[in-house]
Image (tube, rainbow, N blue to C red):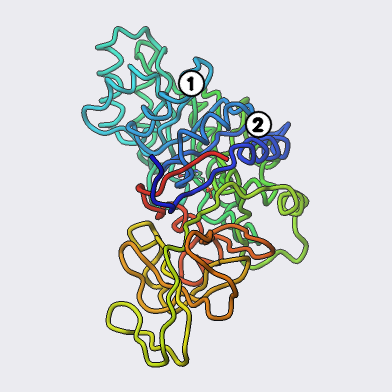
Amino acid sequence: MSTRPCRVEIRTQAVEHNYRFLQRLAAPDADLLAIVKADAYGHSLALCAPAAVRAGARWLGVTSVEEGIAARAVCPGADTRVLVIGGVFPGQGGAVMQHHLTVVAWEPWQLDELRAAASAAGALPGSVPVHLEIDTGMSRQGASPEALAALFTWFAPASPLRLEGVMTHLFAPDEAGGQVTAEQLALLNQILGRIASAGLFAEWLSVGNSAALLAGQARTIGDLAATHGMKAMLRPGLALYGLVPRFNPDFDQEPAALVAARAALQPVLSWKSAVVGVRAVPAGAVVGYNGTFVATEPMRLALVALGYADGLDRKLGNRFSLLVRGERAPVVGRISMDQSVLDVTEISGVEAGDEVVILGTQGSGCITAFDHADATGTIPWEVFTRIGQRVRRVAV
Ligand SMILES: *Cc1c(COP(=O)(O)O)cnc(C)c1O
């Protein structure tokens, strides 16, 4: 059956290309974990996770056990590791064991859940890997440095749990001065010393997102890991999908990794719909709910199969434009749940069935996730993850 034309096109080859580029950037200092949480930032886990694995990814990062099960279903290979970064919830330990997921934990009750599930599954001592998250300053998830020592007992020699990784999240790697990051890494260094003093050893040190990688932090993080006999892992998300995060303030001189990324990364996602019909209206005609747009002259209006239920931010009504026949056509009136109206008076020949590009390129025109984000006061991550579930993702 053919379907409503509102769709997202995913270039899986761009995911592969971006992963390989980022891995080269990180080497030899660090390995990568490919972030595919939130349905691969709205890009489709089912399409993007296997693409990352084809490009060489050994680690996939998801938010929840549910997402981990979905990732495992599309990447069943025994050498693909799936890291659940948002923790485990009560009753989920059995699924962690069954689907060979690896959990990031920091609360005693999470470790209890995992240990009980591991014991119930008859796991041998030290056979279930766990990554411990440390809060080095973000005050979000992760054990505080004070709470840490109490967690070591879950990794005693007889425990089925093994401390495989130590993880922290940098909360301002996009601040070009880098002072905040330097302080977080200094605290992390101290904490790693305490973990070693407690007689524990973790193989992986997992730190840093796209901005950290593109700011050239793989070397710093790799050096820190090496000091403690560990291997470094960085966790890019946005860059895997082809976007370069913004830095604030801009660098006086951009790090080499950032310059290279701007040239190399390829956008993965295009969001498209189509014109349903075109009508001519006289001056004075009102458009959409509450008539917030009034035709100033005789105009031609195109109805598009696209609304806020598809993820187009309703705040863009009367404030944004989309691409038709390679030109920008203003969105006029309020955006409805399922439909929008474009002013195509200035664009000749528009007719039913014409492609409308919401995000991506058409002819010489281009609309980026930053364009959407800037128009609504948000960030590309939110623009991508708001694209509605009912919008089909198709590989191209
Ligand atoms: C989402 C996430 C990332 C990826 O961040 P990007 O800025 O998209 O690269 C990395 N680490 C953690 C813990 C995350 O939650």
Residue 313 is situated, as x and y percent measured from the top left of the image, at 39, 66
Residue 205 position in % (x across, y down) = 55, 32
Q: Which residue is mark 2?
A: 227
Q: Report how many numbered discs are placed on residues in the image.
A: 2
Q: Amino acid at mark 1?
A: Gly
In the picture of the structure, the residue carrying the numbered disc 1 is 199
Judge whether 267 appears above or below 366 on screen: above
Q: Nearer the viewer, residue 375 or 79?
A: 375
- Residue 306 falls in which quadrant of the image? bottom left
Residue reaching furthest to the left: 91
- The residues tagged by marks 2 and 1 sit, at their Cα atoms, a distance apart of 16 Å
Residue type pointed to by label 2: Thr
x and y percentages locating residue 62 in the rendered image: 43, 36
Q: Secondary structure at mark 1?
A: loop
Residue 15's place in the image compared with 338, above or below, is: above
Vertical arrangement, residue 55 with respect to residue 128, above or below = below
Q: Earlier in the sequence, mark 2 or mark 1?
A: 1
Image point 39% across, 58% down: which residue?
A: 311
